[in-house]
Amino acid sequence: MQNDAEAIAAAHRLAASARLNAATRDQQRNLPWAEIEHFTRSGLGSISIPRAYGGPQVSFATVAE
């Protein structure tokens, strides 16, 4: 992930994927392990890390979006 646009696109893909079986997962009281794994692999957890430290340093507005 190199910029704000890529972060937003990744977040939209992750949200779409998580929505697919959310109701069933909730009804069955299952934790979203696959979705957590997808989040981890997406790089979204590191979007606020500064470039100087190897992160993408996306804007705070993008993080909030």
Image (tube, rainbow, N blue to C red):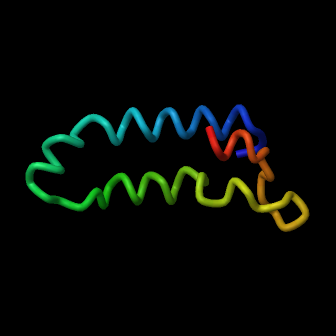
Q: Nearer the viewer, residue 61 or 24?
A: 61
The reply, left or right, for residue 18 in relation to residue 44 is left
User: Which residue extends farthest right?
Assistant: 52
Numbered circles on residues, count: 0
Which residue is drawn at the image coordinates 59% and 59% (left, top)?
45
Q: Residue at x 85, y 67 (%)?
A: 53
> Is residue 20 toward the left or the right of residue 46 in the image?
left
Q: Nearer the viewer, residue 31 or 42?
A: 31
Q: Which of the 4 image quadrants contains residue 23? A: top left
Indicate the position of residue 11 as horizontal and vertical percent values. 54, 39
Against 65, is 43 above or below? below
Say whether residue 35 is left or right of residue 9: left
The N terminus: image quadrant:
top right
| Residue furthest left as drawn | 28
Residue 59 position by quadrant: top right
Task: Using residue 57 as the reference point, say whether residue 16 is left or right of it.
Answer: left
Residue 18: % across, % down: 34, 42
Q: Quadrant of residue 17?
A: top left
Q: Residue at x 24, y 61 (%)?
A: 31
Judge whether 53 appears above or below 4 on screen: below
Position of the C terminus by quadrant: top right
Look at 36% across and 52% down and name the residue there.
35
Taking 58 as reference, is 41 above or below it? below
